[in-house]
Image: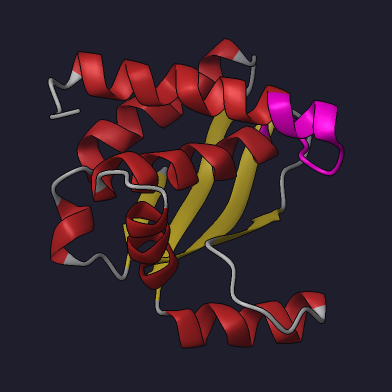
Amino acid sequence: MIKFNGKTKQVKEYTSCFKQIIKQIVKEHHFQVGSINYVIVSDEKILEINNEALKHDYYTDIITFDYSEGKTLEGEIYISVDRVIDNAQKYNEKFHVELSRVVFHGILHMVGYKDKTKKESEKMREMEKTYITQFLKTFHVEQ
């Protein structure tokens, strides 16, 4: 089951589309959906989580907690809607495109993609772009 909690108005209109693409990512990488919980939070909440869980004292757009066992994906993905808004402005991107990047980034981590090295990060960005393009085309979302 894929759930989105703490949804804002901006996020609600895209959740059913996101769920379909997430299911596609999971299937293409030979996993099954267990319980994946996306939690939309504020900057302050994500900073608190980052401090407590990871001992990082900075804002981030996403934190993924992967509790998967075997081929069944289980986890919590926290997304700061404030960071998504700021990053969309910073990179001159539409909100829904930046949001989709972060949503897909979290599930890509869960299916095995990393982003610690330059090479890993490049592959992660390539995969994000692939699924963002799919999201925009499939659901006729404004680009």
Residue 95 position, x and y percent, is 26, 50
Question: What colouring method underlies this structural image?
Answer: secondary structure
* Residue 67 belongs to the span the image colors magenta: no
Instruction: Kindly indicate the quadrant of the structure image that contains residue 62.
Output: bottom right
How many labels were placed on the picture? 0
Residue range (magenta): 111-122
Q: Closest to the observer: 48 or 88?
A: 88
Q: Is residue 96 left or right of residue 37?
A: left
Q: Is residue 22 left or right of residue 138?
A: right
Question: Is any atom of residue 24 visible in this view?
Answer: no
Residue 125 position, x and y percent, is 60, 29
Residue 12 position, x and y percent, is 17, 54
Vertical comparison of 116 with 40: above or below: above
Which quarter shows the N terminus?
A: top left
Residue at image location 31% in from the left, 44% down from the top: 93
Which quarter shows the C terminus?
A: top left
Vertical comparison of 84 with 35: above or below: below
* Residue 113 belongs to the span the image colors magenta: yes
Residue at image location 52% in from the left, 28% down from the top: 128
Q: Is residue 141 left or right of residue 121?
A: left
Question: Is any atom of residue 130 visible in this view?
Answer: yes
Vertical comparison of 79 with 3: above or below: below
Residue at image location 82% in from the left, 81% down from the top: 55
Residue 137 position, x and y percent, is 23, 14
Q: Is residue 39 left or right of residue 139?
A: right
Vertical comparison of 23 with 18: above or below: above
